[in-house]
Amino acid sequence: MTSKFLAAAGFGLAALTVACPAFAGATDYEFHAATPTVKVADDQPVAVHLFDKRTGKPVENAVIFRARLDMEPDGMGDMAERVTSEPSTEKGVYRFKGDFTMPGRWALKLQAKVPGESETVSGTVVVTAGDASATHSGHGAR
């Protein structure tokens, strides 16, 4: 009787596993730099894509509630500069302006609330600040 009970319980557990949909989690989302390079200057525009890794589709209407810009990739995490959110009309694109005060790699650290997701989505994109000849790229590699 015990083996029949265990077999039935195992079958029931397997059926529940198949019947329940997989729920998204904060790790199912990823930020990518759409503007990987900027000039060394104040108020430089930076665009970031937010993707659902499960589908590869852009995530719309996320609320970015925290953004920090610092030089952690070059070992200077204490060197933080101003970054502000800007409006965007493109789906899944989030825009910022930041003060890139010296050449090097800058980390744009973001925290967002995604519609339908209970967990906070966090991510970091690296943007390289160069000399005045650096260009603004509208499309980043994914």
Image (tube, rainbow, N blue to C red):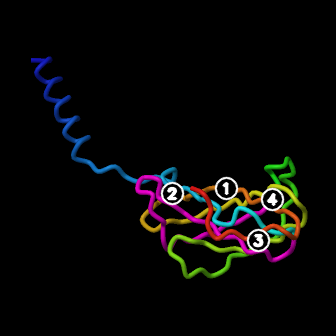
Rendering quarter of residue 105 = bottom right
Residue 83: mark: 3
Depicted 7 relative to depicted 75: above or below = above
Give me the C-alpha separation between circle 1 and circle 4: 11 Å
Residue 41 location (% of width, % of height): 87, 72
Q: Residue at x 55, y 82 (%)?
A: 89
- Residue to which mark 2 is pinned: 119
Q: Residue at x 78, y 74 (%)?
A: 44
Q: Which residues are magenta?
A: 41-70
Q: Please indicate whether residue 76 sits to the left or right of residue 67 in the image.
A: right
In primary-sequence order, the first of circles 3 and 1 is 3
Residue 42 included in the magenta stretch of the image: yes
- Residue to which mark 1 is pinned: 124
Proximity of marks 1 and 4: CB atoms separated by less than 8 Å: no
In primary-sequence order, the first of circles 3 and 2 is 3
- Looking at the picture, which amino acid does disc 3 mark? Val
Q: Secondary structure at mark 1?
A: strand
Out of 113 and 71, give the one closest to the viewer: 71
In primary-sequence order, the first of circles 4 and 2 is 4
Proximity of marks 4 and 2: CB atoms separated by less than 8 Å: no
- Looking at the picture, which amino acid does disc 4 mark? Asp
Give me the C-alpha separation between circle 3 and circle 2: 24 Å
Q: Secondary structure at mark 3?
A: strand
Q: Residue furthest front?
A: 133
